Image (cartoon, rainbow, N blue to C red):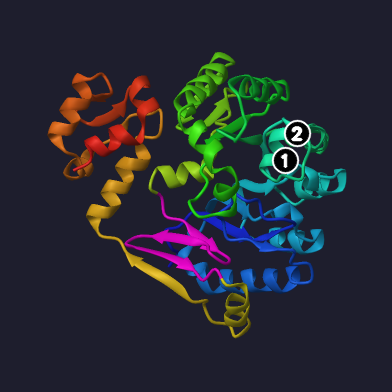
Amino acid sequence: MSGSARHLYVHLPFCAHRCGYCDFVTVIGGRGQDAAYVDALLQELELQRGLLGDEVETVFLGGGTPSFSILPDLLRLLDALPPAEEVTVEANPETVTEELARALRRAGVTRISLGAQTFSPRLLHVLERVAQPEDIRRAVHHLRDAGFDNISLDFIYGIPGQSAADLEADLGHALALEPEHLSCYELEAKPGTRFTHVWGAELAEQADAMEDYFERVVARLTGSGYRWYETANFCRTDEDGRDLRARHNLAYWLGRDYLGLGIGAVSTIENRRWRNTPRLARYLEALAAERLPDREIEPLDTGVRARERVMLGLRLDEPLPVGSLRSALDASGVARAEQLGLAVDGGETLALTRRGRFLGGAVTAEILA
């Protein structure tokens, strides 16, 4: 009997350098470990295959920097993964060569998520990014030449030293490349990190400008024909009628089951969530012995799943079907949000207004029981 998960996440942790603001599970360098890590991933997939449905809808290779992996090992991994309608690989611009782009396209990758972050050399230096603006443009051109017609660019705003003019320039440069998808995130630097130690004062100043930056991003991108379909995500309307939303991430926001492979990877299936050990040596040792790696398991009761479904679902631009989720809502909170013009309760559905979406999490917190 097949499982319920139709979405597969694969974590490739290796990076050339760890940026100061990054809190993902990463391994610096890793050359020489790629083959052993791919072996472990495929062993974990074999042990967990029964959790996947007969047909997988999306596969997402994230990191780390998946495009930093040694190409033969990356291709061997892609060849062994189940086929899917959407196969996304994250990449850093400086790693995208003509050879890599062509190889990924031949391997069945349908979508690339490119970590641009900013076009400003000064701000790229602040973020400790290796790529320069021309690397971003060159990467997009290589991908287009290889036949990719679904490219997403990731950007960050609220960078220390960034001005509103810098942000407007970034958006202009991004739009000139005509990506199918854009993700624009507020910089979140974790307290106590090297980045917050160096840039603490500037980060505090930027906090006051975040609302303005957010509104600028939405206004510029929607004014350029992009659909603001999720709090931080925008997609073009395709002439052929393709849905250019990030289908893998959409599965998270819609509360679908998904399986995660690799160190630090998270899985949520039915009434359980688990996270693999973030320790590479322990992960490799376990899979070499053909056993699952250490993991933290969190039982999920109906109430938790319902609250998560509301929190994530209200990030989208489509009304959330309420149904069995009513128990997760605070009736008086919903009424207050409606009175303030922040939400619309349609009985069977619930949605945030445009103003409510700008306030986002604060409105959702008011609505949740």
Give, as a three-letter code, the residue at label 1. His
Q: Is residue 32 above or below residue 99?
A: below
Specify start and end residues of the magenta stretch as a single range: 256-278
Say which mark, if any, is on residue 351. Answer: none
Say which element carries label 1. Answer: helix
Residue drawn 33% across the image and 25% down it: 356
Residue drawn 44% across the image and 47% down it: 252
Q: Is residue 22 above or below residue 204?
A: below
Say which mark, if any, is on residue 125. Answer: 1
Name the foreground residue: 145 vs 15: 15
Bin the neighbour count of mark 2 within 10 Å (Cα to Cα): few under 14, some 14-19, many 20 and up.
some
Instruction: Say which quadrant the N terminus sits in.
Output: bottom left
Say which element carries label 2. Answer: helix
Q: CA distance from mark 1 to mark 2?
A: 6 Å
Name the foreground residue: 27 vs 140: 27
Q: Which residue is mark 2?
A: 121
Name the foreground residue: 166 vs 345: 166
Q: Position of residue 253 (x, y in %)?
A: 42, 43
Question: What count of labels does the image hold?
Answer: 2
Q: Dots 1 and 2: beta carbons under 8 Å?
A: yes
Q: Is residue 346 visible?
A: no
Q: Is residue 201 above or below residue 63?
A: above
Instruction: Say which quadrant the C terminus sits in.
Output: top left
Q: Position of residue 171 (x, y in %)?
A: 64, 23
